[in-house]
Image: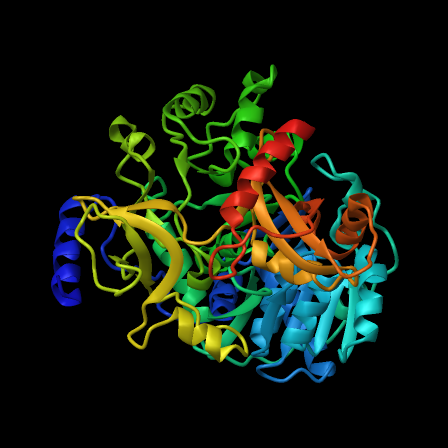
Amino acid sequence: MDTTTYLTELTERQFRAWPEEVPREPQYPFGEISLPEHLRRWAEDDPDRLALVFYGAEITFAQLDEMSDRFAGWLLECGVQPGDRVAVMLPNCPQFVIAMMGSLKVGAIHVPVSPLAQALELEHELSDAEPTVFLCLTDLRPLADPVLARLSVGTVATTSLADMLPDEPALPVPDMVSGSRAPSDWSDILASPRADWVAPDIDAVAVLNYTGGTTGLPKGCQHTQRNMLYTVVTSRNATPELGPDDRAVILVYIPIFWIGGENALTASFVFGTTLVLLTRWDADAWLQAVERYRVTNTGGTVDNYVELMEREDIGRYDLSSIKVPRAMSFVKVLTPEIRRRWQAVAGEHSLLAESAYGMTETHTLDTTTIGFQDGDRDLTTTPVFCGLPMPGTQFMIVDPETNEPLPFGQPGSILIRTPSLMKGYWRNEEATRRSISDDGWFDTGDKGFVDDDGCLHYLGRDKDMIKVNGMSVFPSEVESFLIRHPKISEAAVVAAPDERRGQIPVAFIRLTDGAVVEPQELETWARDNMSTYKVPRFRILDEFPLTMTGKIRKVDLAAQAADWVADQG
């Protein structure tokens, strides 16, 4: 079947299955305008509406507009020009949101850096992005300083989580927030004069979202404001639980420095929603926030929802405001039984559904399962049911060798073409050419199939990505870091099952000639240089099992890793 015939038939099937309540075209509330223009409109039309809540600190849209104007003014004082990068290494907090919007207002490129990153990871991203300004948490400055000493960053500034914390918090505050009161530059930043208004270019690169990859070190995905706007608009269009005039309140504890969290804060700018930020998952703070702020939307892992439902005091809390609960199946998987339990707690209207299929390169949220909850079709259809594409997005299943479309029901490689596809990998034309075809199809690296209704089903990674507590660990990335150790000559990382975390990485290594080192010493080194969830268990080998062509037989290593971890307990 040729591509044109395949896509025509696929589209016809999808339209026949399309839920009546989901628009077939993106519906933009104010048209395709920039995110700062959206914020300014809310600040003018409804200035006292709450934009951000942080443990009781409340920031209106007018205040957010002013604060981000002042951050933009500070950036101009630092010499930032359109296209310059502004790196931000912060957990969930208002400063992150203010810095992101302030960067967009001057045409700079926002670069979110994970505060979980360790030395090698931080050095890679900063040396790759070459930011003009770097804003980090005061508590992370000791980690960052040795890295910054090796790089050329024009301005480095800090902020403390306590800088935006109210004197009398309304919610339980984690120690990492209340204990962070070191002096910072934040008050000076917000004392800067407001930048003059300049409408940003919606098609210029606005964000560099770094993603681990199946080959080599993390790459920066270049996204525009048009990408970001399309993603949140189609996501809201595919949320029929909310009416067009509903004022949503989104409770976010998943990291906003990740692409999924970024979408939540972008939705606040576009739709005038209130964003309730928590720095991390905390059941007590979550429950109190839902009741106090009448939260309508939230998302988290299935494990989080199960933890809530198993609390003896869950009946004391009014969760009836939650209309849009979304789940991510990592260690625990969403089942009809868990869905029924949640409805018993929050109400029949609160239908727990999976979040969408997507990836950083496409700015996520490429599909929707809404409309397929009758009879729990979305949960009982095997394997993973991803649903229909968002309006304007297409997917296609092709033969991995010939790239020709495959018959419906036959598994193959998943390709996606979407308005939110990145412009390419930052300063990596070769990787961009490998991933994006001339006619705009992105090779996801995933396998799947399309059913008779044109719905996507996910089968797994083409490669060997590892999921640790729901966080992606790419073996090639860990291997790239490990071989920087002076005593490691070769490394091969595979997944092993783990009851508590779903999977864990196991690194099989060969040492350099004459080297002697204990696995515990290697683990300590890894913890100093990588995020905790990426740190593998180590096994030292004299030789790797090889194929006839000289490649490492990772399938053999995976079997060894599973047996070894099971024996170790």
Judged left or right of residue 209, residue 90 is: right
Q: Residue furthest right?
A: 183
Closer-to-camera residue (284/123)? 123
Q: Position of residue 151 (x, y in %)?
A: 77, 77
Rendered residue at 37%/24% (across/down): 336
Quadrant into which the N terminus falls: bottom left
User: Is residue 143 among the parts visible in the rendering?
Assistant: yes
Q: Position of residue 160 (x, y in %)?
A: 79, 55
Q: Position of residue 462 (x, y in %)?
A: 41, 53
Judged left or right of residue 466, residue 527 is: right
As drawn, 471 above or below 45:
above
Q: Position of residue 371 (x, y in %)?
A: 26, 39
Quadrant into which the C terminus falls: top right
Rendered residue at 66%/59% (across/down): 490
Q: Residue furthest top?
A: 312
Rendered residue at 24%/46% (across/down): 455
As drawn, 276 above or below 126:
above
As drawn, 238 above or below 319:
below
Closer-to-camera residue (275/109)? 109
